[in-house]
Image: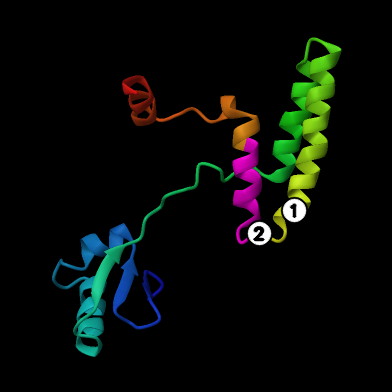
Amino acid sequence: MNNVKFNKNFTIATVSKEFKENMYQYGTEAHKLMMEIRQIYPNITFRVASNRVSSNAKLTYARMKVHLEAKVEAAASAEEKDAIAKLIKEFDKIQKLSKIQRNPYRYVLNWFKGVCPELFPQNEENNNEEMAA
């Protein structure tokens, strides 16, 4: 039963890809379980769980700050270093302001994407739209 997860209304059952492949093969444990579920919930829909991983999964606040600090060290002139040092202070401020936002991480991430766009390559579709305009 660990391969099947139900929504709160028991109208959708989310299953693994392997379970979905086996549930239509007569005689398998997955098939027997599917038949039991269908007897109890005749209108249930089976969906395969997605294994999608966020592209920002490893981009933590600490890593954002490390990247900004690395930009300070890589800056050539004193003016650039001062400007980036101000960004680090602003980053701390944005982190504090994010606490009252609906999605604090998204708020900080959007700010960071604006400050460091070189880390986030645009999709080809976006590039094509910009070229057409």
Q: CA distance from mark 2 to mark 1?
A: 7 Å
Tell me which segment is drawn in magenta: 102-112
In this rendering, position of residue 32 left or right of residue 51: left
| Local secondary structure at mark 1 | helix
- Identify the mark at residue 101; answer none if there is no mark: 2
Vertical arrangement, residue 72 with respect to residue 93, above or below: above
**Position of the C terminus by quadrant:** top left
Place residue 70 in its image quadrant: top right
Q: Residue furthest bottom?
A: 40
- Residue 103 in the image: state x and y as whole percent: 61, 58
Vertical arrangement, residue 2 with respect to residue 116, above or below: below
- Residue 109 on the magenta span: yes
- Identify the mark at residue 46; answer none if there is no mark: none
Q: Are marks 2 and 1 in contact (CB under 8 Å)?
A: yes
Of 33 and 81, nearer the camera is 81
Are there few (<14), some (14-19), or many (20+) residues within 10 Å of tag 1? few
| Local secondary structure at mark 2 | loop
Q: Residue at x 71, y 44 (%)?
A: 61
* Residue corresponding to mark 1: 97
- Residue 120 on the magenta span: no
Q: Residue at x 50, y 47 (%)?
A: 54
Place residue 28 in its image quadrant: bottom left
- Three-letter residue code for mark 2: Gln
